Image: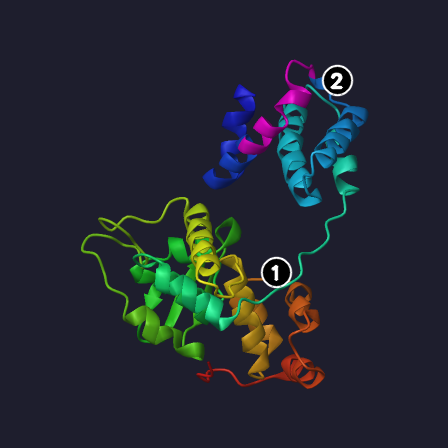
Amino acid sequence: MEGWATWIERQVRPKTVQRYACSLDQMREFVEGKRLDEITGQLVAEMIRARRADGVSNATIKRDLVAVSSVLNYAIDEGWLESNPVLARMQRIEERPRPILLPRSEDIALVIERAPGMVKELVRCAMRTGARQDELLRARRDDLDHDRRQITLTGKRDKRRTVALDPFEAYELLRALPAYVGSPFLFWHSAGESYKNFSSQFAAIVARTAKWAKEHGVDFRPFRFHDLRHWHAVYWLKAGRSIYELQHRLGHSSVKVTEMYLRCGYLTFEEQEAAKVGTKTGTSDR
């Protein structure tokens, strides 16, 4: 494990290392004290059965097994193992895609009303750009091109892409963001610091909003920050814009991934057909 810790830091980003460490802690009871050759396909099957019995989702089980698999891959590189028994079992775990549920405008408004600092602007920017949470949190002021009204985002595996900001009036929002002297970040808090543990912070804001809504008899449907990205994608296509441009805008590696929005239930047949050939880019439809 000590050798793996040094090895994995050269393979993936620090955030992924942290996630792997968390997953390995979850699997500790199954592997602690065992030799490498005792981690067999049978043991992996026992891990899966036990985790399912605890009510853990297939997606989480698969994520945890990826971490165990990475340790065995390191052992293979060191010549201590010839094969990785986790892979075959992991590939048999089916993940059902989570249905796309768009947050309602009134739910978003309630969260924005109760959000502190620049969290309000993060919510609005996610709706107007479709950017991922981490992409917005990593965005710097020099990533914003005022002449071309574009922003360059750094996405998964540090891949960069440039997104036009005229649609949904995203440029006006970003241009108006206050700067903190000496801080490079577009979105900051306190003394110009970047947000840490934002997922848990946002979940807490939504939970507080849900509690307030229940106490006051207000209909409120909780949502995730990632659902704002879905909101952007659906309304991009509803405006008659191209799904191929949406693919680039969202940073999907294949248009096949983006096509899930054609089947999400929020588009009419006519809107689906228009999206396949849409050319209405650069408009400012909300």
- Residue 47 vs 282, above or below: the answer is above
Question: Which one is nearer the viewer's eye here, 88 or 267?
Answer: 267
The answer to whether residue 10 shows anywhere in this view is no
Residue 32 magenta-highlighted:
yes
Name which residue lies at 46% across and 55% down. 206
- Residue 282 vs 193, above or below: the answer is below
Spot occupied by residue 63 in the image (x, y as percentages of width and height): 64, 40
- Residue 282 vs 173, above or below: the answer is below
Give the residue type that dot 2 points to.
Answer: Glu
Question: Earlier along the polypeptide chain: callout 2 or callout 1?
Answer: 2
SS state under label 2: helix
- Read off the residue under disc 1: 253
Name which residue lies at 72% across and 49% down. 95
Relative to 102, 153 lies left or right = left
For the record, the magenta segment spans 22-35
Query: Residue 109 appears in which quarter of the rendering?
Result: bottom left
State the separation of the CA atoms marked 2 and 1: 38 Å
- Residue 162 vs 136, above or below: the answer is below
Spot occupied by residue 60 in the image (x, y as percentages of width and height): 64, 41
> Are there few (<14), some (14-19), or many (20+) residues within 10 Å of tag 1?
few
SS state under label 1: loop
Give the residue type that dot 1 points to.
Answer: Ser
